[in-house]
Amino acid sequence: MTHSKIIYGLLALSLALALFTGLRRIIQSNIVQPDTLQSNVGAHNAEAAHSAGSIGSAATDLASQAALTTPVTGTNSAGQLRINAPAASPQAIQGGTFIQVVERDADTLNPLLTTNATSLAVLQKIYPALVDQDPASGLPTATHGLAESWQFASDGRAITFTLRSGITWSDGVPLTARDVKFTYDAIRDPAIQNLYRDNFANVNDVQLVAGNEQALVLQLAAADCAILQALHQPILPSHLYGSATAAELADPALWPQISAGPFLLLDWTPESRITLVRNPTYWAGAPQLDRWEFHVMPDATARLQALLAGEADWLELAPDQIAQVQARADLTIYQTLADSLTFVALNLADPQDAQPGRTAMDALNPQPAHPILGDLRVRQALAKAVDYGQLLNQVYGSRGRQLGAYVLPTIPWASADDLPSRNFDRIAAQALLAAAGWQDEDGDGVRERAGVPLTLSLVTNTDSPERVALGPLLVAQWQQIGIQVTFQALPFATVTDSLLAQQYDMVLIGWDNLGADPANSDFWHSRYDAPDTGTNFVSYQNAQVDDWLDQARTAPACDPGVRGALYRTVQQQIAQDLPYILLSGQMKAWAYPTAWQALRPEPWGFDSNVQQWWRR
């Protein structure tokens, strides 16, 4: 498999995981992810299966577009999928129809297969997950998941989940631990090709508890707090599919017939509309909404016009659309920091001699240093020479946000939000280079040391307009302190091949959809310094950081207080060692009519209380 295929697959997976937790985020062309490097970078090998980030590219739909096939219950004359949903309870409060406009149609509604953003947004409203995610902090929570509690074994290698009693599927059949085991076993089945299997690579077994239909145990190969993020996967009804073959379970036409979520699938008109209706038996309370509709509108202007005309209720805004919406008193804008980072990766090791970070005996393998970037003073000078305010304003406008740490402030339990952002200080940058022995002896504007000019290369991907615009600005600012940098915008596959092979000086890239658990961000551990596959492609090595990361991933009972303190310590060390120059986070904006009541959008989900929504 090529490097770019690895990255695109992980990008799709990270987007899928993000959407299963209630996010509605489309991958942006200027971000990198640990779950997903964005036309950006993001690759995890099998050992790093729980990575949440992905290198982001400008690729729009990363899932294969499975053709629509014969629906489970048949189609009407228009080719429209039709499901026999029960009528709404006559006692239900009528809350109207909520219309979400989306750029792309679903590809399939089989949750074992899809990584399509629209598909996942639909499935999240139909199939429940074992573990819920707190919409404000991103932490695992029992608020709306099937599990009302869970308990870790003393060694962290087993987790016992207790499910809520009394939950039924919409056909009246009780939902039990058997459904969870069936779903997780299907994901782990090698005969069912799916992108979610790697997230369960640390699961040795899923066991039912004798005499208790509402309990199950996950047996892990090793303690790993990141596993809880994988448990947002939609759960399938085993009484419908338990006798299905692997081929049948991997069929794109395996669409939802019943529900244990707030809505049921009513119909799907390809390339036009998907309609959900209230599930009157939803255990947390039937929604007041009558329907939730997804309207497919590929054109951004058409989507905005639908919102402005009162024909849409939820829209992610493009940056140039915000002003029009702000002028409307009848519309509300919600903005939050997107789950993304844009940065310059600095190769700390010699690109002519890329080596793994650990030996075959799992000991640290010291790397030969990069001849220029191996010097901390040079890295500090590069960072101080960047006029962040100018760059962000020129390229991102009001969307850009300078960051002090790689863990976003939308993860308050783990973010080192007291770390200051780097300041532009050209004089200090020049002093650092001089102290490192780099002087402009011949007056040509480029510093030299021992007759060798201070020259570096910077590359980024052509399919990211923002990064292509950032590159020349960075080159010009570094030129002012005597560093000559050549800049190239290259195809994404070319960039990621050299990045993962660790054969580069500097790469302008980004992470997207990292998720709310830093354990999914395997940027710094020497274990993931693996040429061609590892996400520690900067060859960062620090034995103490390795230890802190391992402690945070395996903390007893995954205590967020203990884990957060460790991650903040890691962020402080990374800020000192400077393997990345963090350039920007980005704000995202959504809009909805002010007439809608009880909406409480949060960074990690906007519809966690959907059953309470109503319209004036």
Image (spheres, helix red, strand yellow):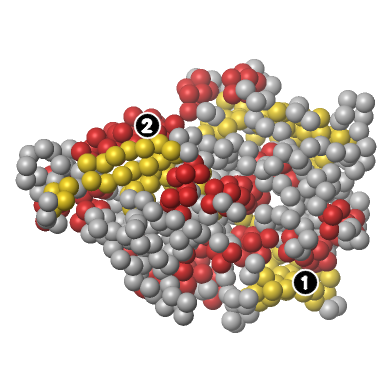
In the image, residue 567 above or below residue 448: below
Q: Quadrant of the N terminus?
A: bottom right
* Rendering coords of residue 209 (x, y %): 80, 76
Residue 503: image quadrant is: bottom left
Residue 159, visible in the rendered structure:
no
Q: Secondary structure at mark 1?
A: strand
Residue 496, visible in the rendered structure:
yes
The tag on residue 469 is 2
Q: Earlier in the sequence, mark 1 or mark 2?
A: 1
In the image, residue 108 above or below residue 21: above
Work out which residue is located at the far bottom of the displayed protein and give it: 154
The tag on residue 501 is none
* Rendering coords of residue 516 (x, y %): 53, 55
* Rendering coords of residue 5 (x, y %): 58, 49
The tag on residue 215 is 1
Q: Nearer the viewer, residue 396 or 496?
A: 496
